[in-house]
Amino acid sequence: MQEIRKQIKPYIKEKCGTMRVLDMPKPIELTGKQGIYTNVNILEAITGRRRLKVAELMQSCDHDNFERIGLSGVKQKRVSGLEVVQHYSKLMVLGKPGAGKTTFLKYLAMQCIEGRFQANRVPLFITLKDFAEAPKKPDILKFIVQLLSSCGVTHTSAAVEKLLKQGKALVLLDGLDEVREEDTKRVLRQIREFSDLFHTNQFVITCRIAAKEYTYQSFTEVEMADFDEKQIAIFSQNWFQLTDPVKSKRFIEKLKDNEPIQELASSPLLLTLLCLVFGDSGDFPANRSELYQEGLDVLLKKWDAKRNIEREQVYKNLSLQRKEDLLSQIALTTFEQKDYFFKQKTAEAYIADFIRNLRDADTDPEILKLDSEAVLKSIEAQHGLLVERAKGIYSFSHLTFHEYFAAREIVANSAYETLVDHLTEKRWREVFLLTAGMMRKTDDLVCMMKIKIDKLLAKDEEIQKVLQWVSEKSNSVKNTYKPAAVRALYFMFTDEIMYDISIYRFNSQYRALPNLAIKIDKSLIPKDQSNDIIIDSVISFLISGLFDVDFYHEHLCFIIEDISNLDFQYEIRAIQNELPSLNQDQEVLSKWLVTDRDVWVGKLRSVMIKNRNIGHDWQFSDIHKKLLKQYYDANKLLVDCLNSDCYVSREVRQEVEDTLFLPIKS
């Protein structure tokens, strides 16, 4: 056994020691000091076989206060891949396309041949596609004999049989899903007979989820888990360690700033794509839709093509282009209905409705039903873009792709009015940005958004008064910022609104505040400071927030230092003198916060209204607060669209910027 390990080691290192996927310029090491391999986790319960309801899967997603979700639904226990292999002698590892199944098998082979895992066995790595298409169609035993013979093993047949009978082999069978349809039955039978005959050996088979409707009775089925944040960080660190170690840190920072892209990184294949893209430019594309399209090209075309794998076309008239059209139609329909998870029957109905209109389609209901089921399974197994999250319940593999396909459908049908109807819904934000990035010219969408935003508050006289104050106040302060940016800031200073929005935290070094407060419009604003805006920022915080006595003392001193009006200074000092002395014991200070602070803040408010026209108590109702929040968020989305990689005419851009946060009459 040790002699065979020695003779087969060069072959295993050559076959399994490196990886090269997508557009890598050269192979990279899998293990060792400069290895790219990242330890994987396994789900012992197959995701798509859990008997869960849609409501259970949706428990992590609040429709009305939308937060991005990975669409994984109910969390499962994750176990180390090596630990699972140690625990089960016969293992079927299932996973989505690009989940890292082959890399995991290569890692097992390398760990074994290096003596770090099952050192008393000989690793036999077999690509099932190669076995199935081998000349003269040998059985697995003969195929292994041929393999070892080519590695220099003498008396091969006897040696192999002895090795297998003694249970000294780690048999790694990779890519059951990659076997051609005409070879499938023979290969399945061969694996079953071989694993039964030599059952004392260790067996690991990999296969895509939903690819083969076959079960080996003696094999335990598990599923490759998506990468978590820790694994993503380790992988990227390993990736960039040779070329630019600092770049891995920037890569992770950029991912954290961009949640939709970060979602894709949970797939090892797509994470590899992200590393390749980032390695070239040190950043992600300004137009995210281009990045997502490249990711889809990998899943739909390149991943199989690079490995010379031909998949069966389950429906002759459903080309890759039509598959994208189908996915787009499903995406927009389900997204509009808030159906991030949908039943298999629903998905098949959408598919049947689509393929019914294809040329030469058989419209017989029974045939359509069978065809739609086959297409669904094909998209899941071959491309992994639709995933069975529980028994009979599907979703898109990533929320990012769901949003991308929805935006693609909107652009294809010029359905911009439909999109603008969702302007105040947070969950549509990414769809807006993607749509803007895909459009040839975004003028119409931008103008429709601006009209919709203005209509939100057009009929409310009280709020129009607030906007009038915002306009007057922003015009009165000396600053070098663009007017729209200043109006946006003062809009946030309308009492509690700035706290409801919660887009920044107050820094005691308040001179840095304007940069934080106006960062939503940073592309419109120069980097220099404005003394008026600094003072107004601090005043707004003091009036609207609940702070301790020390905080009030400290920041009133800052204001006094920064203003030149002596009368105003005098009034502020008088207000400050009404604060308890910091020398008093904590009990007195705490009592003041409860009994006297509100009265004191009222006096402070009056002084600030008189001297700086800021700090008005607008007495907003809950309905007003909701409207103001929607108005602010919608304007922010509009600005984000303008600042994205979209094409907007100079005239439209200027008109929109000039009229942001203005009352209707202006």
Image (spheres, grey):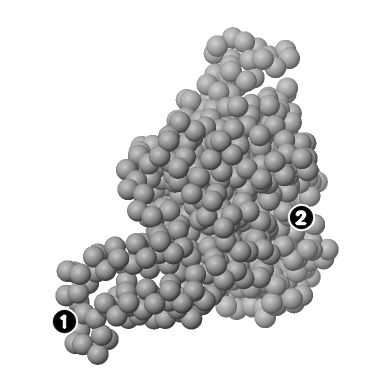
Look at the image and tell me in which quarter the N terminus lies. bottom right
Would residue 330 appear left or right of 561 to someone viewing this image?
right
Q: Considering the numbered disc 1 on the image, is that residue within a helix, a strand or a loop?
A: helix
- Number of callouts in the render? 2
645 lies above or below 461: below
Outermost residue to the right: 25
Q: Amino acid at mark 1?
A: Glu
- Residue 587 is marked as 1
Q: CA distance from mark 1 to mark 2?
A: 67 Å
Report x, y in % for residue 277.
75, 59
Question: How many other residues sit within 10 Å of disc 2, few (<14), some (14-19) or many (≥20)?
Answer: some
Indicate which disc, 1 or 2, sits on the residue closer to the N terminus: 2
Q: Considering the numbered disc 2 on the image, is that residue within a helix, a strand or a loop?
A: loop
Can you identify the residue that label 2 sits on?
Answer: 22
Examine the rendering and report whether any part of residue 90 can be seen: no
Residue nearest the viewer, comparing 91 with 347: 347
Residue 123 picture quarter: bottom right
Query: Which residue is at 48% across, 59% downward?
Result: 503
Report x, y in % for residue 585.
19, 87
